């Protein structure tokens, strides 16, 4: 994504930082473009290790688990991750008293719980 500031935004930025009037073509413009690059660089998200949906699905399959949706308080639809043991007992893998707005959140909580 290539974002740039407009000349008006650069002028405003220059004037806020320096208190001086901005004049295009001067050192002020060069300085303002450098500031623009720095500002835009700080707005880029840091790369991070995210769990993919494929990893989540594979984990569910490996656990023989599923997402169970519940309507709470008569209107709030939330979910948990369940599995069932050999004796047909159900277990909530994402935390007994925890409910989630998305399956991704529930799966991530269940996956984190197995590492504790």
Image: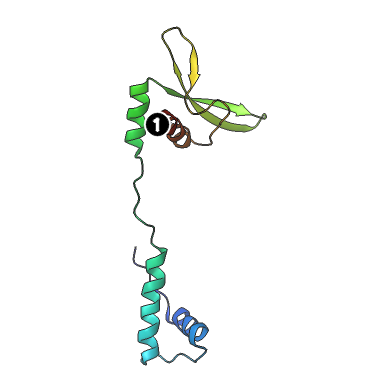
Residue 42 found in image quarter? bottom left
Measured as percent of width and height from the top left, residue 24 is found at 39, 90
Relative height, residue 22 to residue 92 (above, below): below
Residue, x 34% and y 54% (percent of image)?
A: 47
Residue, x 58% and y 32% (percent of image)?
A: 77
How many numbered discs?
1
Measured as percent of width and height from the top left, residue 112 is found at 42, 34
Measured as percent of width and height from the top left, residue 7 is found at 43, 82
Residue, x 53% and y 34% (percent of image)?
A: 100
Measured as percent of width and height from the top left, residue 56 is found at 36, 33
For the residue carrying disc 1, how many other residues have a C-alpha within 10 Å: few (<14), some (14-19), or many (20+)? few
Residue 62 found in image quarter? top left
Quadrant in the picture for the N terminus: bottom left
The residue beneath circle 1 is 115
Residue, x 39% and y 76% (percent of image)?
A: 36
Relative height, residue 25 to residue 96 (above, below): below
Which colour style is shown?
rainbow
Q: Residue furthest top?
A: 87
Element marked by disc 1: loop
Quadrant in the picture for the C terminus: top left
Q: Residue furthest right?
A: 73
Relative height, residue 102 to residue 14 (above, below): above
Relative height, residue 88 to residue 9 (above, below): above
Residue 2 found in image quarter? bottom left
């Amino acid at each position: 994504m290539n974002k740039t500031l407009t000349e008006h935004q650069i002028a405003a930025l220059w004037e806020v930082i320096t208190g001086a009037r901005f004049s295009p073509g001067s050192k002020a413009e060069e300085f303002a473009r450098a500031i623009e690059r720095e500002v835009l660089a700080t707005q880029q998200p840091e790369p991070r290790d995210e769990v993919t949906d494929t990893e989540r699905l594979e984990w569910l399959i490996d656990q023989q688990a599923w997402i169970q949706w519940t309507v709470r308080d008569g209107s709030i639809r939330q979910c948990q991750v369940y599995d069932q043991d050999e004796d047909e007992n159900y277990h909530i893998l994402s935390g007994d008293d925890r409910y989630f707005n998305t399956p991704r959140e529930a799966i991530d909580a269940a996956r984190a719980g197995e590492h504790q």
